[in-house]
């Protein structure tokens, strides 16, 4: 990751619940990670949160 803070990523991170944010930051702290995998992980979390918020069932695994 670059040393510059990605403002969009920061805002999305701060909108997560404290336990989720802690878990994600612990994961990131284990080693270097680029912005793209982090954005993908956050998008996955956000879509799962949106499904739960609207009462939708999680997707079925094959």
Image: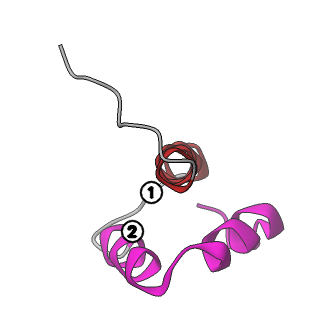
- Whole-percent x, y for residue 52 in the image: 46, 52
Between residues 25 and 32, which one lies in front from this camera angle? 25
Furthest-front residue in this view: 55
Write the residue at 45% across / 57% down: 33
> Helix, strand or loop at disc 2?
helix
Question: Could you tell which of marks 2 and 1 lies nearer the N-terminus?
Answer: 2
Write the residue at 21% across / 22% down: 61
Disc 1 crowd, CA 10 A, few/some/many (<14, 14-19, 20+) = few
Do the residues bearing badges 2 and 1 touch, measured as CB atoms within 8 Å?
Answer: yes
12 is within the stretch colored magenta? yes
Residue at numbered disc 1:
33
Write the residue at 40% across / 62% down: 32
Between residues 45 and 3, which one lies in front from this camera angle? 45
The part of the chain drawn in magenta is: 1-28
59 is within the stretch colored magenta? no
47 displayed left or right of 22 = right
> Helix, strand or loop at disc 1?
loop
What secondary structure predominates along the stretch shown in magenta? helix
Between residues 1 and 12, which one lies in front from this camera angle? 12
3 displayed left or right of 52 = right
Give the color scheme: rainbow, by chain, secondary structure or one colour. secondary structure
């Amino acid at each position: 990751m670059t040393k510059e803070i990605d403002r969009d990523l920061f805002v999305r991170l701060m909108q997560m619940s404290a336990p989720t944010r802690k878990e994600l930051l612990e994961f990131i702290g284990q080693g270097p990670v680029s912005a793209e995998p982090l954005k993908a992980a956050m998008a996955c979390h956000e879509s799962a949160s949106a499904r739960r918020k609207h009462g939708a069932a999680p997707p079925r695994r094959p």
